[in-house]
Image: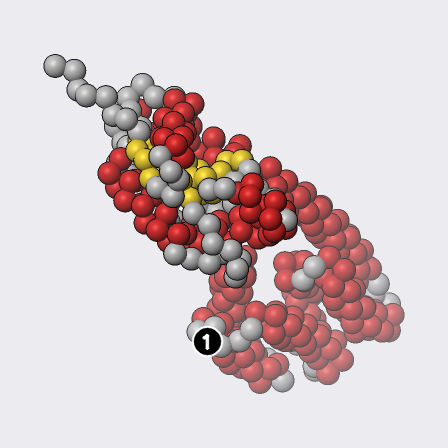
Amino acid sequence: MRITRDLPIDGNQRKRGIYLVLLILGGVGAAVSLAQNLLSPYGATGLSVATIATIVGCAVLAGLTFWRRIVLEQLERVLLASATAAVCATIGYGLYLAPVGGPHAINVAATMLWIPLLFVFCAIAFDGLTSLRYSLAIYVLVVALTLPHAVATMPGTGVMDGLFFTLQAYLAYAVIIIALYFFSDIQQRAYTMEETARTMRRLANTDALTALANRRQCEEQLTYELRRAERYGRVFSVLMIDIDHFKELNDRFGHLAGDDVLVDMARRIERMVRASDLIARWGGEEFLLLAPETNLEDARRLAEMTRHHIDTTTLADRHRVTISVGVASYRGGDTVQSVVARADAALYLAKRGGRNQVKVEIVPAPSV
């Protein structure tokens, strides 16, 4: 098992789900608005066609979103542009084109209550500065649409007449935009700190040359497997792997060649073992392979397969090396140090026996 970066939750998938729900709710809301418009004593208005178009648009986008036929970035921009256009059309029609005396002023006031959701959407969909730019653009559009009507109706007594309502709305919108930008900045800083912490953890647990687990991480995993074995009666095995005559290779070809061999061998062993196994650089040219749920005989076969693969492979495109392997399995009462010491002792026997071989720990005879 190679040490890799922690994977974050799939934020894009979550966003897509949120947008799908919003599209469904938007379609339902538009349908309710259409029904209210058609049943109004004033009869159908010019907004009915726009409302029908909104319902159809929400249905189409919901289908594209559900079946993943639209890129998330495109969906976000289409949603923002469509919602902004619908809001501006409702406000513009209600203030300047609709017949006087109808319910249009109330519709405009209700629409303005929903404008903050556009700012919230910008904060969710885009990064801090982009979100701020889009929010300010929507803010300017709303002001440009409503301010002329507010100035022109100063003496009026309607819901949207005069400056009082619009100025209060402008102030509330400005506060919401600033607050959302502030919290977005905090969120970005928190994300950056989390990324830094994740990187530091990875560096602390990773060997710089091979990108395998380092000794510190390996000892932590050994402790975990030891406690698991003690509690549940499980078994695990440890393989100590050492490159034969590695110093001679360094002396003959240089340390860069030795590094290339270490990296290539690490990759090859990593591809051979199970995802649940942990291959770590123990130190120098020595590797430790932790194999959970593996008894001594299975570990011996794994060691022999690994030894044979390295023996018959050219590493770093030019070097032939061999390895010696010592194997030990967990026994009741073991500590991390004791099981590693037995694997190390078996490795020493393999070295003394001529190298390029596998030796297992000496298992004591059962007491009678």
Compared across the picture, whether 122 is left or right of 363 comes to: right
Task: Name the secondary structure under disc 1.
Answer: helix
Q: Residue 80: x and y, percent?
A: 65, 70
Compared across the picture, whether 31 is left or right of 335 comes to: right
Query: Looking at the rendering, in which quadrant would you find the C terminus?
Result: top left
The residue to which callout 1 is attached is 63
Report the residue at 74% width, 66% height from top: 134
Give the camera-side residue of 85 and 248: 248
Q: Using the rendered view, name the quadrant where residue 290 is placed.
A: top left
Type of the residue with mark 1: Gly
Give the camera-side residue of 252 and 34: 252
Q: Using the rendered view, name the quadrant where residue 161 is placed.
A: bottom right
Q: Residue 312: x and y, percent?
A: 39, 56
Give the camera-side residue of 4 and 116: 4
Q: Can you see residue 178?
A: yes
Q: Can you see residue 179?
A: no
Above or below residue 283? Residue 180 is: below
Compared across the picture, whether 340 is left or right of 156 comes to: left
Farthest-out residue, left: 368
